[in-house]
Image (cartoon, helix red, strand yellow):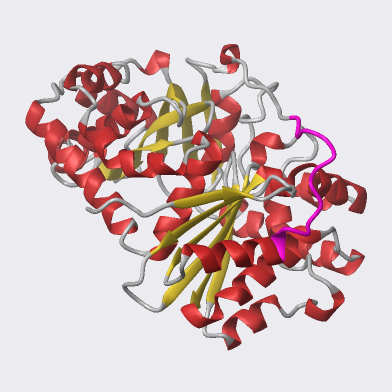
Amino acid sequence: MPAIKIHQSVLSNGLRVVVCPDHGAPVVNVTVMYRVGSHDEVRGKTGLAHLFEHLMFDNTSNALVKQYDTYCAKAGGTNNAYTTFDYTTYYINLPAHQVELGYWLESERMRAFMITDHALSTQRSVVVEEIKQNVENQPYGKWRHAMEEQAFDPQSAYSWEVYGSADDVEGVTMADAKGFFDRFYQPANAVLCVAGDVTPEHATELAERHFGGINAPTSITERNVFDAAWRRMGTHGIVPDAVPMPAVFLAFHVPGLLDDASYAAEIAATILGSGRSSPLYRSLVQEQQIASSVGAFVDKRLHDSLLTFYAYASREDVTADQLVSAITSSIASTTCTEADRTKAVNKLRTSLAAELQRVSGVADSVAYHTLFYDEPDTVNEVLDKYSTQSLTLVQEIASGCADASLGVRVDIVPAVA
């Protein structure tokens, strides 16, 4: 696919501005990505990054209170946001002639802390309800929380899930919220990326007009450190839950997102566990018929990622131990071929290429590469990074997952009445 056109600049307050013009359709995407996620929290205040994502929809001047979505919808646009371990993203899709609205709405969020007591109370309740629905009361939903606790030492900020604890979220004070905003929601800790039917000159001028007057930070953002010694292996957590049959999740530490080997880990996961032709599916679902669903994926993070295998039992008499034994046996008996590598690479490249056909995908990916690599042009190298991963490295990563004692295991099992 053709290279993404990139024009970058930096405002005097430190905000990085990247423009990706594409005049193929009269639409634009305005994305602001902040370098803050759950890894920037502290124990006892978990879930604050995700809570703040919700609060930012209320972080507007009096003239805009509760009107963010209304302004966007009336202009024919859509918007959303998401939080990860290492970053938080806000984005707006708009008709091209409404591009300035996106700048205005996003700059209002960044300009100053304007959360009210009512907004904080409301959003605390919303996030706690999300945790209950998506984690606590969701069948098998507790596995991620359990996995983080098993995979990382309690000293690590990766030892809790992005949602955090409902109790911690309920305890967030106005001082906590303001301190979080002042520390992380500042121009120098963010990237503004605009993609679509806009000229670089106009997009840059709008950035200066709406974001240029926001005060520069008065201090450097301090971050939680990560120590490789905090990775744990050989741990095993068992979580009784209201589920009919067991499920197992077996994860292995692999390099973080800045290490090119993380692409090899994705290839290994795709070979071993993606689709009906994968070794895991053929062995556990088709041949042994002990699982109804299996798969593998890489949960990428800045400092350390997890290559995770999962299997859901197909019958009540199937045990978690059987599933784990079948997973590791299937991995051990698999020798990755060049054809396997090529097929997996093509699948991953096709998925990414499809994402980059949309201005929203371009803005998200370019902002991500600017935020972490400090060089937006690296987005044009990603497709090649998959292709250049050697079969030797892919096999090495895959083989390292054949020993469960080197991984981290979580079983979700039926609770005894």
Between 326 and 79, which is closer to the camera in this rendering? 79
Residue 248 at x, y = what percent? 40, 35
Between 157 and 167, which is closer to the camera in this rendering? 157
Residue 336 at x, y = what percent? 14, 25
Q: Position of 344 compared to 32: left or right?
A: left
Q: Determine if residue 295 is in view.
A: no
Q: Which residues are magenta?
A: 210-222
In the rendered view, tell whether residue 4 sits above or below residue 150.
below
Single out the residue that lies furthest toward the bottom.
Answer: 74
Q: Is residue 379 magenta?
A: no
The residue at 52%/19% (across/down) is: 235
Q: Report how many numbered discs are placed on residues in the image.
A: 0
Q: Position of 196 compared to 329: left or right?
A: right
Residue 380 at x, y = what percent? 33, 44
The secondary structure making up most of the magenta span is loop
In the rendered view, tell whether residue 316 sits above or below residue 203.
above
The residue at 51%/43% (across/down) is: 370
State the quadrant of the C terminus: top right
Residue 49 at x, y = what percent? 70, 47
Q: Is residue 221 magenta?
A: yes
Q: Position of 389 compared to 11: left or right?
A: left
Single out the residue that lies furthest toward the front.
Answer: 201
Q: Determine if residue 222 is in view.
A: yes
